[in-house]
Image (cartoon, rainbow, N blue to C red):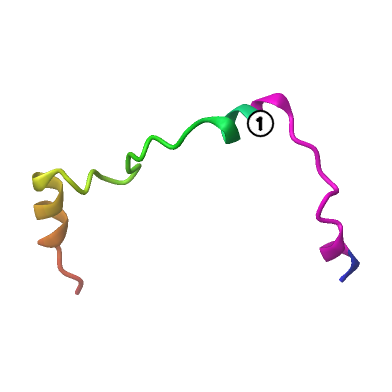
Amino acid sequence: MSQNFDIFDFTLIEDDMSAIATPDTAASLFFDHRDADAVRRLSGRTHN
């Protein structure tokens, strides 16, 4: 339980700070929802 109170017991290195500061590109890492072929391919899948 006491470990839950240690929320500030960490440090961020410069690489971490740079990654946090990098703006979101709004690009999906899974697939592009605006790509008709990708949407068609995924929407046609069925689960057994």
Quarter-of-image position of residue 34: top left
Left/right placement of residue 37 relative to residue 16 reads left
Residue at 61%, 27% (x, y): give it. Answer: 18
Residue at 80%, 38% (x, y): give it. Answer: 11
Q: Quadrant of the N terminus?
A: bottom right
Left/right placement of residue 21 relative to residue 44 reads right
Nearest the viewer among 44 and 21 is 21
Residue 40 at x, y percent in the picture: 9, 54
Residue 9 shown in magenta: yes
Residue 14 at x, y percent in the picture: 70, 25
Q: How many C-alpha atoms fall within 10 Å of the one at disc 1: few (<14), some, or many (≥20)?
A: few
User: Which SS does the magenta portion mostly show?
Assistant: loop
Amino acid at the residue labelled 1:
Met
Residue 21 shown in magenta: no
Nearest the viewer among 5 and 41 is 5
Q: Is residue 13 above or below residue 31?
A: above
Nearest the viewer among 20 and 40 is 20
Quarter-of-image position of residue 13: top right
The magenta region covers 3-15
Mark 1 secondary-structure assignment: helix
Residue at 15%, 68% (x, y): give it. Answer: 46
Q: Quadrant of the C terminus?
A: bottom left
Q: Which residue is mark 1?
A: 17
